[in-house]
Amino acid sequence: MTALGFLHPGHAAEDDYPRIEQLLGSDIRLTVVHTDLDEDPHSVEALRAMGSAQRLAAGVEELRLSGAEAVVWASASGSFVHGVQGAHEQVRGLAMAAGLPASSTAFAFSHAVREIGADRVAIGAAVSDEVAGLFAEFLGETGTEVVAVHGSGAATPAEVAGRDYGRVLALAREADHPDADAVLLPDTALHTAAHLTALEKDLAKPVLTAHQVTVWEALRLTDRRVNAPDLGTLFTREPLVQV
């Protein structure tokens, strides 16, 4: 059994985690603990506060008691808004508080892009252009070229979570660019676990989404290698694990 822990901001699309756990089809347990979320988390200052050391530390003990072997702060915007250096400090603080290997969704995207061999990417996010641009800057600092950035506005997490496949596909198509090797959808409020293979078929290229890369990152921290094609190209890069 491999137990993985996730600190998730508020409530929105966290039911993607049990779906992913099922699709992994292995002895992997995903435990989600919710952190406090301000009413309007879309300003840069609010996003920075959302990922403060105090808020993250508050959920750590529950994850430790669950037997988690690694912990990931399951928020892209709550990590990349700090910049690469600040995001590193955030993760270091989380690792020290948990006494476990730690990472965040922002670094998960950076590592996943390298895993699939994508040199250039496009970003589609349900946030403001300002916040989406900070994600592009973060990826640029970690060595990934961003060829297109599409911010569709600061919708509420509940509204984003309610988007059906048609609207998720529309966001991905609006973000896509002919020069992009992959399309990134960084919103943790977006339901994508059930749509990954369809998205990749429609766009004819890899698609990386927040919960998908977050779970992959936790597995990477524990040196687990899982082949799960229903979770997209990212989960076909490693040898099949015999269960």
Image (cartoon, grey):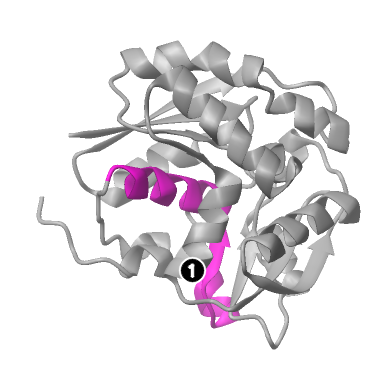
Q: Residue visible at 48% across and 52% down?
A: 212
Q: Residue visible at 56% across and 56% down?
A: 109
Q: Tell which of 38 and 192 is nearer to you.
A: 38
215 relative to 115, above or below: above
Tag 1: Cα neighbours inside 10 Å, few (<14), some, or many (≥20)? Answer: few
Tell me the quarter of the picture where residue 38 sits: top right
Residue indicated by mark 1: 114
Residues rendered magenta in the picture: 198-222
Element on which disc 1 rests? helix
Visible residue check, residue 107:
yes
82 relative to 208, above or below: above
Residue 168 in the image, given as x and y percentages of width and height: 67, 59
101 left or right of 114? left
Q: State the quadrant of the N terminus.
A: top left
Q: Residue visible at 35% across and 44% down?
A: 221
Visible residue check, residue 166:
no
Give the total of numbered labels. Answer: 1
